[in-house]
Image: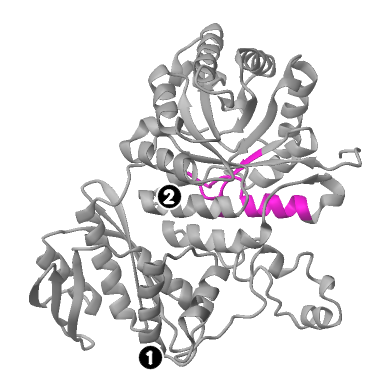
Amino acid sequence: MPTSSEPRQITIFDTTLRDGEQSPGCSMNLREKLEVAQALADLNVDVIEAGFPITSLGDFKAVREIANTISGSTICGLARCRNPDIDRAWESLCQGDDVRIHVFLATSAIHREFKLRMGKDEIIHRAVEGVKRAKSYCDNIEFSPEDAARTEADFLCQVVEAAIDAGATTVNIPDTVGYATPNHFAGVISDLINRVPNIDKAVISVHCHNDLGLAVANSLAAIENGAKQIECTINGLGERAGNCSLEEVVMAMQTRSDHYQVTTRINTPRLVPASRLVSSITGMLVQRNKAIVGRNAFAHEAGIHQDGMLKERTTYEIMRPEDVGFTKTDLVLGKHSGRAALADRAKALGFHLTDEQLTKVFEDFKDLADKKKDIYDGDIAALIEHQDTQTVDQWKLVTYEIQSTSGKTPTATLTLSHGDQQCTKTMSCGDGPLDVLFRAIEELTGKTVTVTDFRVQSSTRGKDAQGEAIIEAEYNGRIYRGRGVSTDTVEASTRAFLNVINRIESGTTEGQPGATT
């Protein structure tokens, strides 16, 4: 435990847009990445790893646009210790005001033997050359020895010392496969501090995966032993079991500042809005009992807990809900609420709306107000998120009619528009109303997909709550995700399936990146 009376400043490095996006089905298009990047900037994240530019044109464009438009955070691009990777990373970052190149190379024995087929000397040479090339472009350079937690201590020290000598200003120690335990990982960090002679010339960072559920614990152990940067993601998003959860590690350090004696720049009331945004864009729902941002994180049902809460909140709450972004009240709007009230609530929920977007959301808000008496925060969020899925000049739902009786084949008549044209299809087949509607959409659009995931949930409480449908489907080897919202769950599901088709036609998905640290 630190003994200094002055709290250390911990750098928060968010990799939701790079490592988080590697989760199957979590790819984002350019507009979505810009939205998440803005939310991260609003959160006061110190470093945003915006992508891996060499992997695809989409990733390159995303890093370039984020570097050119987002302010308040350092924008980082990932590269292997290969000249083409590093050159491409710099090409995407070069117009930004505050940028970093992050280079990596595996160092563990198992990676050296089976993946790289390189000896130790060649690894060190390649790492040094990679850092030097990156340094020729900018001063802010991070180096990661991939699978550091399973790398021999002596060799890890050698690689880190060489990378710092070559110009690395941050050295990141990844637990790439989530193998470490807190005591083990604490030893790795303290070993580097005690044995690497030039370690004071670089910031020690950690990047922990959650395969054993220890990513947050390992990151905190590293902080206790001298690390100064934590790499993490919103909602713990990431490949396999995910990464260190930003909201959890930040609130652990803040709530237990008496122990850790550290501080961050994070604007914690933006945690819940950022969590909701990432969840809605990726389709990865946050479990109800997830720490900090889960729906039940501050719920108290047991009678003894409720009694204690009424007498003194701190009996059962170590944080205030409003400190992480839960609103004290779920503000109710209705048909008489105006545009200004809607705009104010959208801003409080963490959304940045242009005048054009606000106008469209307000139209949908008024339509919804005619269908249900009270409109809650969840309804507003669903309306805004639904707008984000809309594209122009694509297939749109006009009308549908269903005849479905238990034990009998359903019949559906569906009308879609595409530009100025409308087309109608009547079908009698399938295993229920949604199946026949989905088949009718496929017939009219000429696109046949394989649904891999289908979920319907309510956006708020009550029998008149909006239904949010999320569909993931595979087409030509790629995963596409669609969302639909309506008080009619059949309509919501139909719109979600149609949104998948629209995304296929517009190509609004990116291939999965192919690297990890």
Residue 299 counted in the magenta span: no
Q: Residue at x 78, y 78 (%)?
A: 305
Q: Is residue 214 visible?
A: no
Q: Residue at x 73, y 32 (%)?
A: 184
Residue 417's disc number? none
In the picture, measured across the screen, residue 192 lies left or right of residue 450, that is right
Q: Position of residue 352 (x, y in %)?
A: 48, 63
User: Which residue type does callout 1 highlight?
Assistant: Lys
Magenta region = 230-254
Q: Position of residue 342 (x, y in %)?
A: 49, 78
Binning the other alpha carbons within 10 Å of mark 2 as few (below 14), some (14 to 19) or many (20 upward) gives: many
Residue 231 counted in the magenta span: yes
Q: Position of residue 391 (x, y in %)?
A: 27, 62
Residue toward you, 210 or 212: 210
470 lies above or below 134: below
Residue 310: quadrant of the picture: bottom right
In the picture, measured across the screen, residue 262 lies left or right of residue 69, that is right
Q: Position of residue 6 (x, y in %)?
A: 88, 41
Residue 33's disc number? 2
228 lies above or below 489: above
* Count of marks placed on residues: 2
Residue toward you, 414 or 214: 414
Q: CA distance from mark 2 to mark 1?
A: 33 Å
Binning the other alpha carbons within 10 Å of mark 1 as few (below 14), some (14 to 19) or many (20 upward) gives: some
User: Which residue type does callout 2 highlight?
Assistant: Lys
SS for callout 2: helix
Residue toward you, 46 or 253: 46
The N terminus - image quarter: top right
For disc 1, the marked residue is 371
SS for callout 1: helix
In the picture, measured across the screen, residue 5 lies left or right of residue 89, that is right
